[in-house]
Image (cartoon, grey):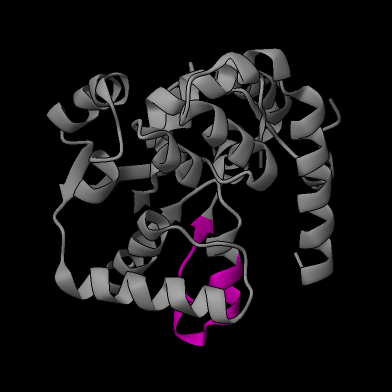
Amino acid sequence: MGVEELEEFEREARELRRRSADWEFIEKQPEPIKTALKVLVETGDLWLAAKISGLPVDEFDEIRIKARIPVVV
Amino acid sequence: MSVAVADTCFLVHWLRFRGRERLFDAFESVAVPVMVLDEMGARGRVMLAPWLASRRAFLIPRINECEVEALRLVEFSRSQRLPTLDPPEAYCLAVARRRGYTVLTDNKAPKHLVHALSEYSGVRVLDSLDVLALIYGSGLAEAVKAYEEDTGLVFSRSRLRAYGVEL
């Protein structure tokens, strides 16, 4: 995947995350979970978002699934 | 069969997949850096425990040389404006290069890095779709559906088409 293809992939993935996310659920979360979920929607970086949340990656991933944020591979 | 070293995000998702045991159809064993284990909570550790107990998975200690190399890779990816490389996947790359392991990760960054850094060009990097294709072959479409259901991952439709899968 070249740079342009990667940028296109990232753009599409971000749109999908924004569209799919349950924003009502996200807005109801306490901080720093809420911010971490928003970072995940924008960046797709699960590890970084988990770090921001202060939770282990698998526990944060459970919340990601409830927030309906897809990880795009 | 070869040994793979697994990054946190790959492991968290793969352990949720109903067909997780089939990983050992493709790899003799899976190395888990302690750095990766430390990123996992109770659920992940419980899921990983049978693999560790049966010695199909084994832990890799923190190695200072690999940690320093991981930092170099993170800095390199930033300087080259490559996709963001997180420390655990950088550590997996450093270990894989030294030991001849395959890296398992669902992030894009390691695949780009092995193309950008000549000394890493021999490191094999696979994501969960690549691994599913290796294991399931002609049954890939069903496996992809199950994987997406179990993990909340979505595979890029263009990548699926490249593997001959239309969902």
Q: Is residue B158 visible?
A: yes
**Front one among B149 and B64:** B64
Residue positioned 62% across, 71% down in the render: B82
Residue positioned 49% across, 49% down in the render: B105
Could you tell whether A51 is left or right of B107 in the image? left
**Front one among B121 and B12:** B12
Range covered by the magenta-colored residues: B112-125
Residue positioned 36% across, 55% down in the render: B88
Tell how many labels: 0
Q: Quadrant of residue B78?
A: bottom right
Could you tell whether B107 is left or right of A60 in the image? right
Question: x, y (%) of residue B55?
Answer: 16, 35
Q: Does the segment drawn in magenta span residue B151?
A: no
Question: x, y (%) of residue B119?
Answer: 44, 85
Quadrant assignment for the C terminus of chain B: top right
Q: Quadrant of residue B100?
A: bottom left
Could you tell whether B114 is left or right of B86 in the image? right
Question: x, y (%) of residue A51?
Answer: 40, 42
